[in-house]
Amino acid sequence: MKQKLVMPGDQLSTSEELLPGDGTFEENGIIKAARIGTYVVNEKHRTAEVKPATSVPVMLKKGDLVIGRVNSTRSTMIIVEVVHVVGKRRSVSGDTDATIHVKEIAPGYIKDASTEYKNEDFIRAKVIQVTPSIQLQTKDRNLGAIKALCTKCRHPLIKKSQGLECENCGHKEHRRIADDYGALDIDKL
Ligand SMILES: [Zn+2]
C-alpha cells in the first residue's frame, strides 16, 4: 500500500487505472483529491482514496494555525476558505470563509494584496479574529503560501533562489511564501 500526502485538487490517478473512492472526485477522466489527507490505493477494490488528515470537527479559536485555499483576490484583501486546523487532526466546523487584509499579509508594506496570493494557492495562516468574521494573518516566517500553481499552465511552482518558477513552462512568479514552501510535511498540518 503506497501513501502520499495530498491537497484538494491534486491529481491522483486516472479513471482508466482506478475508480474514484472516498475523499476523491473524477474530472475529465482524472481522479483528484477532494480533501487534505493521505492518498491510498485500495488494491482490493481498485479505488483511489484520500484518508482525511482530520476527523472530529473543531471550532476555530484566535491563535490557531490553519491551512486555507485562496478563493478570490482583491487589492485590499484575500478571501480564503479554511480547510484545516494545523495540529488538531480535525476539520473545521461552521463558517470557513476567512479574509486576510492587505496589512496582514507580510511584515513590510504591501500595496496590492493580489500581487502576493493567487486563486487556488494553499496558505498557512494564523487566526487573529473569529467573530463577527474570520480574519487571518500571514506575517510570521512560517506563514504564507505552502503550495501554488503556475497561473499560465497550472503546474506546480518550485522554490528557487530568485523566487518561484514553474516546473513545466519556466514562468517566474511571486508569492508571499512560508519558509517551508513546497516541503509539505504531515507533521505541520
Ligand atoms: Zn507554467
Image (tube, helix red, strand yellow):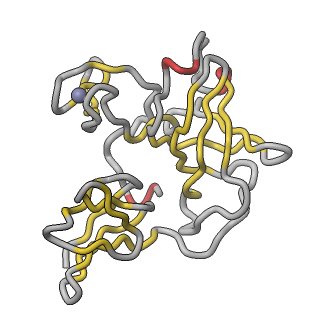
Is residue 21 positioned above or below 118 on the image? below
Residue farthest to the front, as pictured: 28
Give residue 110's position: percent from left, percent from top: 58, 14
Left or right position of 104 against 7: right
| Image quarter of residue 140 | top right
Residue 46 in the image, given as x and y percentages of width and height: 20, 81
Q: Nearer the viewer, residue 26 or 171?
A: 26
Q: Looking at the image, which residue is at 52% across and 70% down?
A: 54
Figure quadrant, ligand 1: top left
Residue at image x 56%, y 32%? 72
Residue 156 place in picture, x, y as percent: 27, 38
Task: Return the x and y of residue 83 as percentages of the image width and height.
Answer: 55, 55
- Image quadrant holding the N terminus, namely bottom left
How many labels were placed on the picture?
0
State the image quarter where residue 60 is shown.
Answer: bottom right
Task: Please state if 6 lies on the left or on the right of 77 as rendered.
Answer: left
Q: Measuring 27% from the left and 64% from the top, which residue is drawn there? A: 4
Q: Is residue 13 left or right of residue 154?
A: left
